[in-house]
Amino acid sequence: PPAPVEPVSTPSNISHSTAEPTFNLPKLDLPKFYGDVLQFTSFWQQFGEIVDKRKDLAAVSKFNYLVSSLKGDAKNVIEGLPVTNEHYEDAKKLVVDRFGRPELVIFHHIQALLTLPVTSKTAELIKFHDKLMAHVRSLEALGITSDQFGVILTPIIVSRLFQGIREEWSRESEGHEADLSHLMDFLEKEMRRRDRCKTLGGLDETSEKPAN
């Protein structure tokens, strides 16, 4: 059976007095990871701060916390590995190699960008823009800037927009056809414009047709 887990405390749980300090050690809710590569970086950073970097926890306890944090397909990666001090680093390597390789994470973000759905409706355009920004920010956190992939992605993303929006982009994008940052700024302005038009009753969202 897995070794007993040492409780995890936070600095706010430590009470100070002239006598020997007393530690209040409540149960801590750990992040959960189910195997979605796009969620791995966030999960791993949280796990690192809460558990892995702790100097007061034995490796076997960290291993137990890792086991309890992994669910579904993610947990299968370390299935059968003995929960011991000696195998904690092996378990971490297996998890990172399976879900956290930078090239794998980058590939999944790019793939997600290429399959973003969009409609002409303002609410859907807002969701499209927000998802686009989320993936771009994640890529930048991995050291991949929009300058590096914008020349490829910008025309593809534009091709997924509706005809009316594409026509407006063609009027405003001269000299910036491969500039992803310029496209994101354009979409933000387009959302504001469409929102104003809708408020004034000048936007018929049912008249737009999907991009071919």
Image: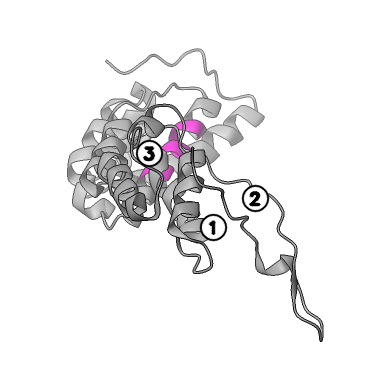
Specify which label sits upstream in the sequence, 3 or 1: 3
Q: Amino acid at mark 2?
A: Leu
Residue 31 in view (yes/no): yes
Tell me where residue 115 appears, x and y as whole percent. 31, 26
The residue at which mark 1 appears reads as 50
Tell me where residue 161 appears, x and y as whole percent. 35, 26
Tell me where residue 191 appears, x and y as whole percent. 51, 37
Tell me the magenta residue range. 127-135
Q: Main secondary structure of the magenta part?
A: helix
Q: Crowdedness of circle 1 by 10 Å Cα count: few (<14), some, many (20+)? A: some
Q: Crowdedness of circle 2 by 10 Å Cα count: few (<14), some, many (20+)? A: few
- Cβ atoms under marks 2 and 1 closer than 8 Å: yes
Q: Crowdedness of circle 3 by 10 Å Cα count: few (<14), some, many (20+)? A: some
The residue at which mark 3 appears reads as 38
Q: Could you say which quadrant of the image residue 98 lies in?
A: top left
Specify which label sits upstream in the sequence, 2 or 1: 2
142 and 43: which is toward the camera: 43
In the image, 206: left or right of 212?
right
Q: Amino acid at mark 1?
A: Ile
* Cα gap from disc 2 to disc 1, whole angstroms: 9 Å
Mark nearest the camera among 3 and 2 is 2
In the image, is residue 132 part of the stretch drawn in magenta?
A: yes
In the image, is residue 45 part of the stretch drawn in magenta?
A: no
- Cβ atoms under marks 3 and 2 closer than 8 Å: no
